[in-house]
């Protein structure tokens, strides 16, 4: 039985949020290009509507503002690589939201260790809330199958 080599992801909170958000924006552009390049006779179908909805949802996502105090916190985790042939839009979305989620975990760890009266607590709490909203909104995007 072959062993699967795990890949290590290593960044800062700022880099992880940027990576995750950029991946979601790349998906938005890809889906929008599919819709824009559909033959006219398919542009009014249910698949085109679903793709348009997915593109709109991804395009309207907002990148959270990262407080200076947590920008350089490390974000590290290992994951099993997905074979290129299985890199569906859903899988790529899930990978992007996992990166965002790990940045949230790093920020939450800082918050758990910070004094209750730390001057940056509120900013970090707001960041966590915004990053979780980004992750949740992205997780709710549905991508239609090839033949729907």
Image (spheres, rainbow, N blue to C red):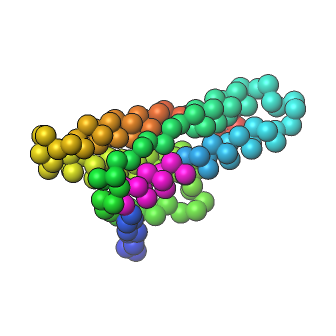
Magenta segment includes 115: no
Percent across and percent down for residue 52 are: 68, 31
In this rendered view, identify the residue nearer to me: 35 or 1. Answer: 35
Determine the main secondary structure of the stretch shown in magenta.
helix
**Residue in view at x 67 percent, y 45 percent:** 29
Magenta segment includes 22: yes
Percent across and percent down for residue 54 are: 61, 34
Q: How many marks?
A: 0
Is 13 displayed left or right of 33 in the figure? left
Q: Does residue 54 appear in the picture of this structure?
A: no
**Residue in view at x 87 percent, y 32 percent:** 40
Percent across and percent down for residue 17 are: 43, 51
In this rendered view, identify the residue nearer to me: 73 or 25. Answer: 73
Q: Give the range drawn in magenta.
A: 12-23
Q: Quadrant of the N terminus?
A: bottom left
In this rendered view, identify the residue nearer to me: 117 or 45. Answer: 117
Look at the picture and state if 133 lies above or below 7. Answer: above
Percent across and percent down for residue 49 are: 70, 27
The quarter of the displayed image where residue 4 is located: bottom left
């Amino acid at each position: 039985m072959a062993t699967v080599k795990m890949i290590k992801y290593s960044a800062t909170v700022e880099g992880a949020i940027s990576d995750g958000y950029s991946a979601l924006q790349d998906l938005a552009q890809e889906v929008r290009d599919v819709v824009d390049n559909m033959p006219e006779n398919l542009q009014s179908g249910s698949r085109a509507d679903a793709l348009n909805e997915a593109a709109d949802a991804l395009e309207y996502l907002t990148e959270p503002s990262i407080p200076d105090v947590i920008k350089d916190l490390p974000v590290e985790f290992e994951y099993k690589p997905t074979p290129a042939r299985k890199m569906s839009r859903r899988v790529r979305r899930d990978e992007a939201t996992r990166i965002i989620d790990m940045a949230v975990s790093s920020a939450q760890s800082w918050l758990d260790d910070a004094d209750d009266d730390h001057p940056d607590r509120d900013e970090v709490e707001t960041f966590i809330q915004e990053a979780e909203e980004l992750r949740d909104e992205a997780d709710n995007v549905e991508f239609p199958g090839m033949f729907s």
